[in-house]
Image (cartoon, rainbow, N blue to C red):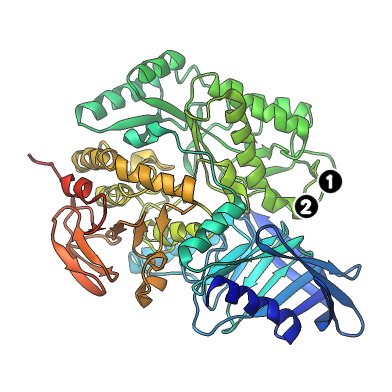
Amino acid sequence: MNKLELEKFFLDQLTNGDCRLIISRHKAKYKMNRGSFKTHDSLHDVHTLAFEHREGDRYLFSDGKVGAEIILTRDPFIKMHFHVDFGYDHFSIVFKTFENEHFYGAGEQYTNFDLSEKTVPIWVSEHQQVMKIAMKLLRERVRGPQPDHVSNFRQHQSYCSVPSFISSQNYGFYCHSDTYGRIHLEKKGEVRISFRGVPQSISLLTADDPKELAAKLCELVGIGPRVPSWVGDGAILAVQGGTEVLRKKYQEAKEKGIKVAALWAQDWCGHVVTSFGYQVYWNWAADEELYKGLKEFIAELNADGVRFLGYINTFLKEGSPLYEEAKKNRFLVRHENGEVYLVKSTTFDAGIVDLTNPTAYEWYKGIIKKNMIEYGLSGWMADFGEYLPTDSIVYGGDPKKLHNRWPSLWAKCCYDAVQESGRQDEIFFFNRAAYGHTFQFTNSMWNGDQHVDYSDEYGIGSVIPASLSLSCSGCGVVHSDIGGYTTVMFMKRDPELLRRWSEMNIFTPVFRTHEGNRPKDNAQFDHPEVVEEFAENSRLFAELRPYRDHVFDEYYNDHLPMIRPMFFYYEDEEGFVNQREYLFGQDLLVTPVLRKGVTSWKVYLPKDKWVQLFTKQKFEGGQWIEVPSPLGLPLAFYREESKFAPLFESLSIKKGE
């Protein structure tokens, strides 16, 4: 069907009986533990409403006892606006769909790119859950590594939730609602969209092909600010431990031939050592005891063409100077009894800055402007945003209606600070949490806290489905921590994993490492078994810049996400389900090695003519192939007919020459 036929297919359902509304009253329970949520609905007085009659663009639904209406507008998408009889606060709409279609998006999904036969919660949460990690560690202690183990999808939560989905049939829905919701895709030929509260509206998006559909969704949620040019110069190296440590590691990196775009010191504001590891001290001002002469060192880096990045989140550590200032001024989220609502992410308590309080918002934005931008930072990791408790007291009203909005408020606070400083062409910040329209306020999302292993649920195997699902949710720019982050007990990063991850991230928008929460337990970029290849990969990332800039432009100008599923361009059935490969732009097929100790790797090539990037071997697409995959050989293929073929042909691995 073309887009007009798809519009007619769904709009006809409003009157032919295929569409129905379900309204009820409800009570919801929420329980939060370290940002993860358990929640339950109790529904009563449930009514299923069918079409009754139409008055122009007003469609009235009823069961003879209660009623609701849908009002259609177009701006430019078809929008369904809902009015429901007073007192009914749980809402579902059901549409007939197609047999054997595939569904994608709804935010960041780490284990399932294709959401067919799934029910997806629409609620921003901490992705990592303490009990699931404990069970994983126990299981692997007994049985050894099980990289292909994946928990039941019903247990999954995500840092990034978006109230939308798209279909392989070239349509999608975007729900304008901030409350808890679910998208039910488990029943073939039917979709049910539910929210605790009546949505303001639901947009119907239709297109003639998947690229047009993805572009429309990007336009709807908003295009993010452009990533500064310097990010393409090379690696953003994670380093910590004080000015002299940074200076030493930077000099060694240059001597080893690493292309360095920036140093990223997340402990710029100090650190605390806890049972979880080496953690940032959540007080957003330079620790000039740990980082003596930091301002001068940043100036040295800048003179050398290198930037300096830091870290900030939505919390203030209990007892820190900024916490005490915020507490005194009542800038923190509170309990009903008026006390500060302290939350625990890992091992210590912290208060949440109330971003709905205009005065607190201006204060926090001012801290970013003064303590970070004016100090000389060229960017930061804008962490967290998922932890607003539903039983708290916030200036802006009901926290259950504000919880999903929190990531957007946080990203906008950073965005406003940058814009007001006039540094939007220089500063690069990246977010973990998102909902709805968050993407328009951040330079880049990153995939969150992957485990330092090969697992499909939490490790390197989760990055591609997470990135692809974000691309089908309106997100244009996303990258991951090279090597992962979470290090617990015997789960430590080995040199091979770091090498494989850096091979993959050559073909992403950003080439950035992370030391992890236990840096001394993890192989780092300067490990003897890593550093030579890491330098090579940083060079390849820099040399790929002309193509990457082209892909950036396709996002900013044409609104196409940078990381793309195969079905954007190819109708191969494999392309609708493959979540181990991705297209970077149109012309590069990236097929990274996602397992330890392998020397060959199976790759699916869609129907086209392909050239392996570094061996220059040619292949006909539409088939699975197996290719050698030694360490040091990043796996990617380019379209033989690409206008960038001369650039791709010029790229080579020079290690050992």
* Quadrant position of the C terminus in the picture: top left
Give the SS element for disc 2: loop
Residue closer to the observer: 498 or 582: 582
Mark 2 to mark 1: distance in Å? Answer: 8 Å
- Residue 477 appears in the picture as rendered: no
Quick check: 277 above or below 142? Answer: above
Residue closer to the observer: 526 or 193: 193
Circle 1 packing at 10 Å, graded few (<14), some (14-19), many (20+), is: few
Residue 198 is left or right of residue 639, and the answer is right
Residue 628 is left or right of residue 28, and the answer is left
Q: Position of residue 552 (x, y in %)?
A: 41, 45
Q: Residue at x 84, y 46 (%)?
A: 336
Q: Position of residue 18 (x, y in %)?
A: 70, 85
| Three-letter residue code for mark 2 | Asp
Q: Residue at x 28, y 71 (%)?
A: 607
| Three-letter residue code for mark 1 | Glu
Give the SS element for disc 1: loop
Quick check: 495 above or below 188? Answer: above
Circle 2 packing at 10 Å, graded few (<14), some (14-19), many (20+), is: some
- Residue 265 appears in the picture as rendered: yes
User: Residue at label 1?
Assistant: 336
Residue closer to the observer: 324 or 83: 83
Quick check: 621 above or below 98? Answer: above
Sequence-first tag of 2 and 1: 1
Find residue 28 and report its image quarter: bottom right
Quick check: 149 above or below 307? Answer: below
User: Residue at label 2?
Assistant: 391
Residue 40 is left or right of residue 634, and the answer is right
Q: Position of residue 556 (x, y in %)?
A: 48, 45
Say if mark 2 contacts mark 1, CB within 8 Å: yes
